[in-house]
């Protein structure tokens, strides 16, 4: 039996309608920016496997560190025990996170990192003797697939069956020059009517919302209003974290710093799943009490797994290396050059860029999940390029180690698409 036939026997893939979806492609090996399928064909990983493998797949330095860690300490309960990799990682994270972040809480994935952030915010108020039950979120945000994170997400196509069980979320549109006054008005009305515990947002770039981008100064005003009302601000940096926007964290672009930051994806460089929720001293202090009841009762069995921590430490080392910082700059410049070349193309509606994230909207007729999407996807795969268009949006979010030639191949495949679409 082929891998594909065996796959079909017992596997149920995420985000997949198995009745109509084409077969899953078996990948047998990955190295640097390249993926290899079971027929030996190679693909350039233009989205770093959902923004995780930013330092390239199977990076030898990370591999070495993981191997060492695996032979020393594999796993230990993180309630009542501690270990060097978790301690060191907390130190390294605090160095690169916005100045106001002081404490590091571990979980397993981006959704749980947000779940933790939301629970921290709710209990922060609860511990202070105030019941605040409403969360504010952006209309088309995405924060994950667990209940709290899903409630705060805006993509209702998926969420229909669960809506009755959602936590209480009020939504505002992402701000821009035209709607800014209205958004502020809506925000103030929500604050006046509801007991708002927290505001959760993806800073500057909404990944799942087709890489929608918005400006720091408008977001800053929203954050200021939240702070003035003791509304806990939660920056979901699961996608934007670790250099993708051109700074370590997108929150660095915004004057008002969040109370809580969630991160995952590139945190562990594509090697293993792990997530972190960081917070300020103010949040942490609200859980300190002589009564155990005010403690934060949230745990995952694999919290701060030593192997995952060792990966994250090695990843942060790479992120800060001159080599990676230089390649980030190179990618940012290449995207700009490419953009100058194509932004006026008749089949392109708009383009946008933040750091190494580049996106363009096609000016053609199609549905977000229609047939055309698969045709575009197939076009790229046939050209040896792995991109996953979101509706009419084609975006590139390459591993930092992508070579100039590989990046050019991606650009050329987009130009070729414009000829045939
Ligand atoms: C991917 C993502 C999540 C969810 O992370 P998972 O690890 O898939 O649970 C949450 N927020 C943002 C912004 C993301 O990009």
Image: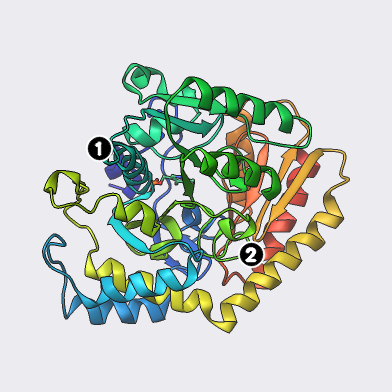
154 or 339, which lies in front? 154
Q: Residues within 10 Å of mark 2 (few under 14, many from 20)?
A: many
Q: Residues within 10 Å of mark 1 (few under 14, many from 20)?
A: few
Q: Quadrant of residue 168?
A: top left
Residue 161 in the image, given as x and y percentages of width and height: 35, 18
Which of the two labelled residues, at mark 2 and mark 1, occupies the earlier sequence position?
Answer: 1
Q: Is residue 75 left or right of residue 244?
A: left
Residue 178 in the image, given as x and y percentages of width and height: 78, 31
> Which residue lies at the image location 36% right of the left edge and 42% below the top edge?
121
> Which residue lies at the image location 50% right of the left edge and 37% below the top edge?
229
> Which residue lies at the image location 34% right of the left edge and 72% below the top edge?
89
Residue 353 in the image, given as x and y percentages of width and height: 71, 53
Q: Is residue 73 left or right of residue 350?
A: left
* Mark 2 residue element: loop
> Mark 2 sits on what residue?
246
- The residues tagged by marks 2 and 1 sit, at their Cα atoms, a distance apart of 43 Å
Closer to viewer: mark 2 or mark 1:
2
> Mark 1 sits on what residue?
9
Q: Which scheme is used to colour this image of the protein?
A: rainbow
Q: Please say whether residue 270 is visible from this viewpoint.
A: no
Q: Is residue 202 left or right of residue 288?
A: right
> Which residue lies at the image location 17% right of the left edge and 80% below the top edge?
71
């Amino acid at each position: 039996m082929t891998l594909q036939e065996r796959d079909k026997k017992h596997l149920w893939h995420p985000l997949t309608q198995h009745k109509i979806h084409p077969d899953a492609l078996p990948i047998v090996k990955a190295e640097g920016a390249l993926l290899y399928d079971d027929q030996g064909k190679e693909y350039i990983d233009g989205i770093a496997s959902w923004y995780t493998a930013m330092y390239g797949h199977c990076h030898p330095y990370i591999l070495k560190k993981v191997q060492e860690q695996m032979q020393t300490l594999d796993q230990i309960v993180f309630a009542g025990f501690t270990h060097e990799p978790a301690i060191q990682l907390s130190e390294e994270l605090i160095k690169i996170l916005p100045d106001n972040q002081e404490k590091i809480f571990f979980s397993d994935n981006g959704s749980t990192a947000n779940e933790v952030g939301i629970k921290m915010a709710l209990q922060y108020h609860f511990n202070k003797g105030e019941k605040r039950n409403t969360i504010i979120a952006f209309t088309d945000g995405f924060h994950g697939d667990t209940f709290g994170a899903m409630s705060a997400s805006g993509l209702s196509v998926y969420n229909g069956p669960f809506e009755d069980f959602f936590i209480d979320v009020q939504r505002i549109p992402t701000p821009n020059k035209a709607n800014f006054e209205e958004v502020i008005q809506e925000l103030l009305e929500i604050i006046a009517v509801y007991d708002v515990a927290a505001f959760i947002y993806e800073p500057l770039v909404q990944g799942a919302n087709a890489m929608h981008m918005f400006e720091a100064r408008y977001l800053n005003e929203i954050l200021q209003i939240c702070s003035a009302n003791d509304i806990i601000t939660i920056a979901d940096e699961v996608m934007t974290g670790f250099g993708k926007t051109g700074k370590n964290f997108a929150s660095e672009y915004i004057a008002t710093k969040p109370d809580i930051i969630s991160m995952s994806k590139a945190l562990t460089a594509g090697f293993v799943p792990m997530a972190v929720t960081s917070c300020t001293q103010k949040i942490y202090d609200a859980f300190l009490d002589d009564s155990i009841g005010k403690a934060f009762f949230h745990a995952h069995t694999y919290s701060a797994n030593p192997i995952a921590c060792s990966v994250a430490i090695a990843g942060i080392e790479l992120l800060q290396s001159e080599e990676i910082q230089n390649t980030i700059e190179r990618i940012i410049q290449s995207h700009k050059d490419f953009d100058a070349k194509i932004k006026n193309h008749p089949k392109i509606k708009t383009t946008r860029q933040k750091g190494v994230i580049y996106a363009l909207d096609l000016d053609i007729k199609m549905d977000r999940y229609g047939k055309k999407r698969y045709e575009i996807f197939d076009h790229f795969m046939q050209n040896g390029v792995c991109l996953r268009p979101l509706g009419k949006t084609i975006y590139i979010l390459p591993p930092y180690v992508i070579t100039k030639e590989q990046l050019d191949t991606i650009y050329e495949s987009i130009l070729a698409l414009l000829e045939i679409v």
